[in-house]
């Protein structure tokens, strides 16, 4: 279930700042029409940090309803409070989520043992497939390979989204526990090299705007068409980099606005990018014929 080309989908907002259900449903259809293997609502790209609890469940519910079992929905239900993550995960399960994406506890800066116990508690409390989410640039701590290998022994912890930018760590996890846990890229620009090491796919930011192309690259690797995959990886590299010229999801939401697919509204403390970065982004998007 948790492999292939998966999108960390944005949460579009109206001019008034509420969840734009119409545009959200359209974006989900755009993904499914272009072959995306799973939809991941309420991740970093979905601005989960500024969704209140009611909105968080609303976004997950809309996604599950629109997808209608055509592809898996991997709901982002992580929190820096273990009890809060458990409660949100239970509610997502009740709504019909197929799996959970659980960000490493942020701000608290727990020990590695604390991280292990956090994930173990959620796994024991909620009977759904679970994906660890390691993104130290956001959370302040790295989930060490040793901890991921230990967590891989828990049956419903089935994957880890690695966004630490560390190919050595990825390789160590695959070497030691690749038969028990799927490693998933959390950095678009590293998907190809990570899959070359044995990763099983990507939870992608770029797929919000080029779902077909991201899927094609991942499929080429899966099918052993390495030369084609390498070319596609290199062809997409500048676009992947452009999606991170400002804090995610500022560039990708700006891109969707420029493409006419959704408003670019963000929630504070995120705000629009400055004019220099906007010009840089537009130049890249024109190269890819996206605008």
Image: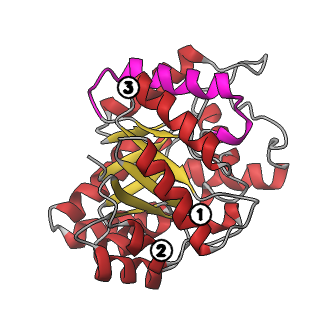
Alpha carbons under labels 2 and 3: distance apart = 29 Å
Alpha carbons under labels 2 and 1: distance apart = 14 Å
Give the camera-side residue of 73 and 234: 73
Q: Nearer the viewer, mark 2 or mark 1?
A: 2
53 vs 236: above or below: above
- Magenta span includes 230: no
The residue labelled by disc 3 is: 96
Q: Which residues are magenta?
A: 47-71
Q: Which numbered dot is residue 147? A: 2
Q: Earlier in the sequence, mark 2 or mark 1?
A: 1
Coordinates of residue 257 in the picture (x, y in percent): 64, 32
- Magenta span includes 53: yes
Coordinates of residue 109 in the picture (x, y in percent): 72, 67
The residue labelled by disc 1 is: 135
> Which residue: 57% across, 16% down?
21
Give the camera-side residue of 116 and 162: 116
């Amino acid at each position: 279930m948790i492999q292939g080309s998966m999108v960390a989908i944005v949460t579009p907002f109206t001019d008034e700042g509420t969840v734009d259900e119409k545009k959200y449903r359209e974006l989900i259809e755009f993904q499914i029409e272009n072959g995306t293997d799973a939809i991941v609502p309420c991740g970093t790209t979905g601005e989960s940090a500024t969704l209140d609890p009611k909105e968080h469940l609303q976004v997950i519910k809309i996604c599950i309803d629109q997808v209608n079992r055509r592809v898996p929905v991997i709901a982002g239900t992580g929190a820096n409070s273990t009890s809060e993550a458990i409660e949100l995960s239970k509610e997502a399960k009740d709504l019909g989520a197929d799996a959970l994406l659980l960000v490493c506890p942020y701000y608290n800066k727990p020990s590695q043992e604390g991280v292990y116990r956090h994930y173990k508690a959620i796994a024991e409390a909620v009977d759904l497939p679970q994906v660890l989410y390691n993104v130290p640039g956001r959370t302040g701590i790295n989930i060490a390979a040793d901890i991921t290998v230990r967590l891989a022994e828990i049956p419903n912890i089935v994957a880890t989204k690695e966004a630490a930018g560390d190919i050595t760590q990825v390789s160590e996890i695959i070497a030691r526990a690749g038969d028990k846990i799927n490693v998933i890229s959390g950095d678009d620009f590293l998907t190809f090299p990570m899959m070359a090491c044995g990763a099983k796919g990507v939870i992608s930011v770029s797929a919000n705007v080029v779902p077909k192309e991201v899927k094609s690259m991942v499929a080429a690797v899966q099918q052993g068409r390495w030369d084609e995959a390498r070319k596609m990886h290199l062809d997409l590299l500048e676009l992947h980099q452009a999606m991170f010229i400002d804090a995610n999801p500022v560039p990708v939401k700006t891109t969707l606005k420029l493409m006419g697919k959704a408003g670019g509204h963000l929630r504070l403390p995120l705000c629009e990018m400055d004019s220099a970065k906007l010009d840089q982004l537009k130049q890249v998007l024109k190269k890819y014929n996206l605008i």
